[in-house]
Image (spheres, rainbow, N blue to C red):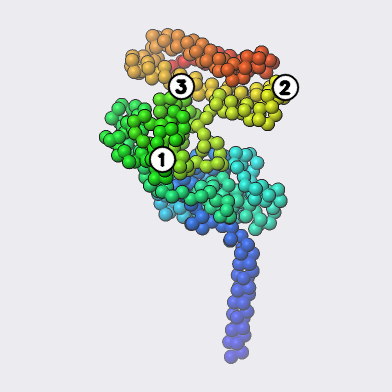
Amino acid sequence: MLKKIGRSKSITLLLATLLMAMGLQLTLHAGTSQFLFDMDAIKDPGSLAVKLEDTRAPVSQLIASQLSEDGQRLLAGYDGISDPSPKLQEALLTDLNRLLQAGPLYDVQVFADVELSEQTQTLIAENPKDEEALVRLNRWLLADAYPYELASLSAQQDPEDFKGIETCRENLRLIKLAREKYWIANAGADPQWLSELCPEYLEEKVLLCPADATAGVPGVLTEGGADPTLPCSYLYELRPSEKTGQVNLLLQEGDMLPIVRCEHHLLNLSAGGKIYRSGPQRGIYTSNKTGFSVLNDFMQELRAQHGEAFLKTQKGRQELKQATEKLILKQLVPVLLNAFEEEVYTQLEAQLGANIINTAIGMDILKQATGQIRDQVKAQLQSQLEAHLGAEFLKTEEGQDILEQLSAQIDVFSLNGR
């Protein structure tokens, strides 16, 4: 009997110890649990999944690389336009909460292009070390990086929810399908305007976003963007005036390049048929500008900050030189040369057959084309540099260095066959 009582006391003591330990554990984590995501906090799982696949975004690269094996597999299988499966949504929720608690997420370079809220900047400045503060900071960082996809810790910080967004998503999905049918029926050609899809491939009403109070009145979207035939709420990026620039961008941006935009819901339909939200956090989701357009914006920003005279100082010239090297020499020139190269091969194969490329005649044609392309690209770029930077700048040491780099870069270009 005494043994029984003693055993009973031991069990009671063990249970009490376990409960205390559990209570202590709950106390330790009570402060962090309030910062974790729940399913409602993932406001747009489809857009989040698309952005996590976007290799251009350092934040997405960081997160995607740390997803579980299951999460990465499900993410790779997502088509980017349908509703994500419950399994994918659950995997994203689990992985995000694990990352929140895994340690500091903040990295200056990774979050360089993210528009951080005042609250997040304050938390970063405090340099938190304890678990609760780190989890809270991580939650703010992710909400800043994906403001339309993930809820923040403050309703006041979240962008407004848009009415009719699901109808708009369906419109973009139908536009995608109609464009694919048009593309097949027209030997790989894109429509010049979205209205060309109607009525054979698309109902006219699909071109109207439910949030567009003007019902597609021309001129509302952007200058030169109004469809000339039908009322249209959507901005078509492959319209005639933008076609050449978008083709060059496509080589650089890949299938994430937006080709149809809803500026009422900040929704993009990409060249690869994926739908995702725009947003203020990164230029790659809000602008198609590249090359000289970005350089021009950079110069305007310098003028606004320092005045026109700053551009003529040595420091100003150095900043212009660095921006030109990055935006023009390293980014734009390779894209242009690749585009010309692809065009030459396509034309040769179409007119003379694929086998002509590596024959003596084909090599002779490529040699002649190489010289013509070099001269054409160099003349065009030098003219653009003078128009944007000014003739006086090109006479300076910095300007001369840019021209020398440009010539050296183009002179090594050659077409040697595939």
Nearest the eye: 248 or 223: 223
Of mark 1 and mark 2, the one earlier in the sequence is 1
| Residue on which disc 3 sits | 339
Say left or right for 149 vs 229.
Answer: right
User: Mark 3: few, some, or many residues within 10 Å (few <14, many ≥20)?
Assistant: some
Please name the residue that numbered disc 2 is placed on: 313
Mark 2 is surrounded, within 10 Å at the Cα level, by few (under 14), some (14 to 19) or many (20 or more) other residues, namely: few
Q: Earlier in the sequence, mark 3 or mark 2?
A: 2
Q: Amino acid at mark 3?
A: Ala
Q: Is residue 79 visible?
A: no
- SS at circle 3: helix
Residue 309 placement, left or right of 341: right
Q: Amino acid at mark 1?
A: Thr
Hey, which residue is sitting farthest bottom in the picture? 1
Residue 189 drawn above or below residue 146: above
Rounded to the nearest angstrom, the CA distance separating label 3 from label 2 is 36 Å
**Which quadrant is home to the C terminus?**
top left
Rendered residue at 28%/35% (across/down): 199
Disc 1 element: loop
